[in-house]
Amino acid sequence: MSNREITKNSQARMIRSWMLGLHATYITDIGGRLGYFAEMRRRGGTVSAKELAETLELDPWRTKVWCQAACAVGILQADGDTRFAFAPFMDVLLGDEAPELQTAHVLASLARDFPAYPEAFRTGALKTFHDHDEDFFHHQGKVSALRAPVVVAAARKLPGMEERLGAGGRVMDIGSGSGTVLVRFAEEFARCRVTGIEPLPYFAETSRTLLQEKGFSDRVEVRSVGGEALSFEHEFDLITMVQVFHELPDAKKIDVLHGCQRSLKPGGILLLVDRCAPETGADLHDRRFTLSILEQWFEVTWGNIVNTRSEILAMLHDTGFTVTQENPDIVPTYWTFVAEKQDAGIKRSDI
Ligand SMILES: C[S@@+](CC[C@H](N)C(=O)[O-])C[C@H]1O[C@@H](n2cnc3c(N)ncnc32)[C@H](O)[C@@H]1O
């Protein structure tokens, strides 16, 4: 925590900055959805509201109000009295595929859950991941695509994995979402075979289309089942499960880990990447936990439980895995657990 003196005024400023942030997030989201940022870039970065509105066939006065609001929160800046330009670096940070813009879209989409919170806190009503809409899935898929290279790079560094996958080994990605991890493995390892496990029809279908477009349908498949229904026996060198463990029904987490044990070849590795809930009061103020805590907050009505690091370690141990590495830095803001299936299914502690 900062050492700056905390006063009533500084706390009030903090509250006002959150409220400004709420507006700024929506101004960003709507600027992206209406194509304002893309059109500004197309015109070299400066534009009048009239030009923007005419090209995009939008209301000119409302467009001017958006431009002024974008200036007020620091996204744009005035260029004379009637023209607007990007504030420094905003043209790049708010590019079509930029993480900042995509995250604003996901947040704005997620925020549609909040009006139902007061009632849901009284009744315990659920709205699961799968109950969300295609707008949310689409933007969520774009944000997670940004993680795919990091996940495959982490897998490559696992002992012996580069050789195994290079020689035609098999990878399974559980909760494969938009399919970008599947594609990345196929691109980086020309001979490896990849299986995605994805129960959500929207993701299963869009990822199959992506695989077809990329020409990988012969060695990458997507199965439309949940991780509870794995039916493999000693077949995979590597299983990845990225931001999925907390999505599994709590009572099924152990079953899924048992299924991973059965599916892996001896010496195979489960790479589990997920959020970790705080274990102590001090963790609540540790920045490494901030996004995990907020993830549990915006998923509190989804039925998801974000486990603590100790809980995940215990479940991995109880299902026969040996955790050879755990690291909060490999995939930023997530914990990465490297869990190995022992040769002949014998736990190291038993040897
Ligand atoms: C937050 S997304 C993560 C997607 C992807 N792994 C990534 O990193 O982008 C969670 C994924 O878990 C999937 N999922 C939810 N319940 C599941 C289950 N029981 N078994 C397997 N996947 C599940 C969802 O459909 C979704 O694709």
Image (tube, grey):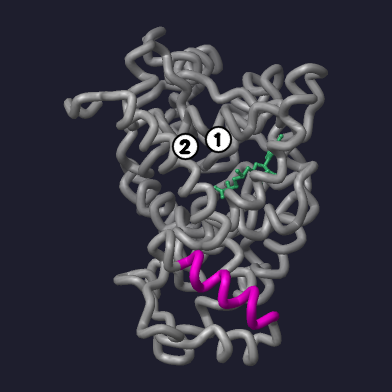
Secondary element at tag 1: strand
Q: Are marks 2 and 1 in contact (CB under 8 Å)?
A: no
Residue under pointer 1: 264
Q: Residue at x 48, y 27 (%)?
A: 293
Quadrant containing ligand 1: top right
Q: Determine if the C-beta at disc 2 is less than 8 A from ligand 1.
A: yes
Q: Quadrant of the N terminus?
A: top left
**Magenta-colored stretch includes residue 69:** yes
The quadrant in which residue 92 appears is bottom left
Tell me residue 186's x, y (percent).
52, 63
Q: Which residues are magenta?
A: 59-70
Residue 148 shown left or right of residue 116 in the figure:
left
Which disc is residue 273 wearing?
A: 2
Which disc is residue 277 wearing?
A: none
Q: Residue at x 43, y 59 (%)?
A: 73
Tell me residue 332's x, y (percent).
36, 43
Q: Residue at x 39, y 47 (%)?
A: 155
- Viewer-nearest residue: 125 or 57: 57
Q: Is residue 73 above or below residue 38?
A: above
Distance from disc 2 to disc 1, alpha carbons, whole Å, reads: 17 Å
**Magenta-colored stretch includes residue 203:** no
Residue 202 visible to the viewer: yes
N-term-proximal mark, 2 vs 1: 1
Q: Residue at x 37, y 73 (%)?
A: 77
- Label 1 crowding class (10 Å Cα cut-off): few <14, some 14-19, many 20+? many
Secondary element at tag 2: strand
Task: Looking at this view, name the residue that lies furthest to the left.
Answer: 3
Q: Is residue 266 above or below residue 346?
A: below
- Viewer-nearest residue: 157 or 298: 298
Badge count: 2
The quadrant in which residue 159 appears is top left
